[in-house]
Amino acid sequence: MKLFYTPGACSLAPHIVLRELGLPFKLVRVDQSTKTTSEGQDYFSIAPCGYVAALQLADGNVLNEGSTILEYLADLKPEASLAPPAGSWERVKMRERLSFLSCELNSTMNPLWKEVIPDGVKQIFRMRLFKRFDVLDKEVAGSHYQLAGTFSIADAYLFTMLRWPKRLGFSLEPWPALRQFQSRVESRPSVCESLAAELSAQD
């Protein structure tokens, strides 16, 4: 498998999951300014929308949506328990959480990166984001992770996005449970390895 990634982007989540599962894969970096890969490919030929992550399978098929990639990977090694069993109520609830993270966090933070968007509009998105952080902070307080107290693909996704506020110019200080969650996940070997690999690729 090939994971197409950009350091610090959403692709960090499947990168972490691949290492959690111990699956063989190759990292292929995407230059977002030119939309070319480290292998010299036009990235649009792999991901028509141009964003990461993308996962190319051995048979050439490609998955482009982050939450789908995460579920696919978890199901390759179900004994690792990074996702509840398919068909269970817990699996439905996990999909609900992945949808929340994608639609309510990722989509809300996306405009904050864009210089062309006025500060007044960005403030509206910040306030919406902060309300979502309020919800998550209450949910993870007293629990190590988001789903039944065990690390899951949803945690890899949330951890990835909790790294963005610092780059966007604000702190997680008002949400102590989220800060504790971030520190807890950051100490996992798979996360340390993923961050080190992406940092090394930037040098």
Image (cartoon, rainbow, N blue to C red):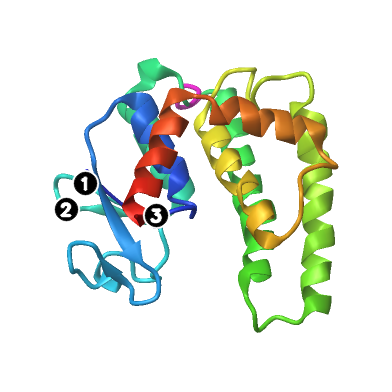
Identity, as a three-letter code, of the amino acid under mark 2: Gly
> What range of the chain is rendered magenta?
83-87
Q: Position of residue 104 (x, y in %)?
A: 69, 53
Q: Crowdedness of circle 3 by 10 Å Cα count: few (<14), some, many (20+)?
A: many
Q: Nearer the viewer, residue 93 or 152?
A: 152
Quarter of the view holding residue 78: top left
Q: Residue at x 76, y 38 (%)?
A: 136
Q: Work out whether mark 2 precedes mark 3 in sequence or the reverse, and give the earlier one.
A: 3
Relative placement, left or right, of 113 versus 128 is left
Q: Residue at x 78, y 45 (%)?
A: 133
Dots 3, 1 in contact, CB < 8 A: no
- Mark pair 3, 1: CA separation: 13 Å
| 64 on left or right of 160 | left
The relative height of residue 50 versus residue 130 in the rendered view (above or below) is below
Check disc 1 and report the residue beneath it. Answer: 57
Foreground label between 2 and 3: 3
> Is the magenta region chiefly helix, strand or loop?
loop
Circle 2 is placed at which residue position? 60
Relative placement, left or right, of 193 versus 174 is left
Q: Which residue is mark 3?
A: 53
- Judging from the image, what secondary structure is the residue with disc 3 in? loop
* Residue 54 in sight in this render: no
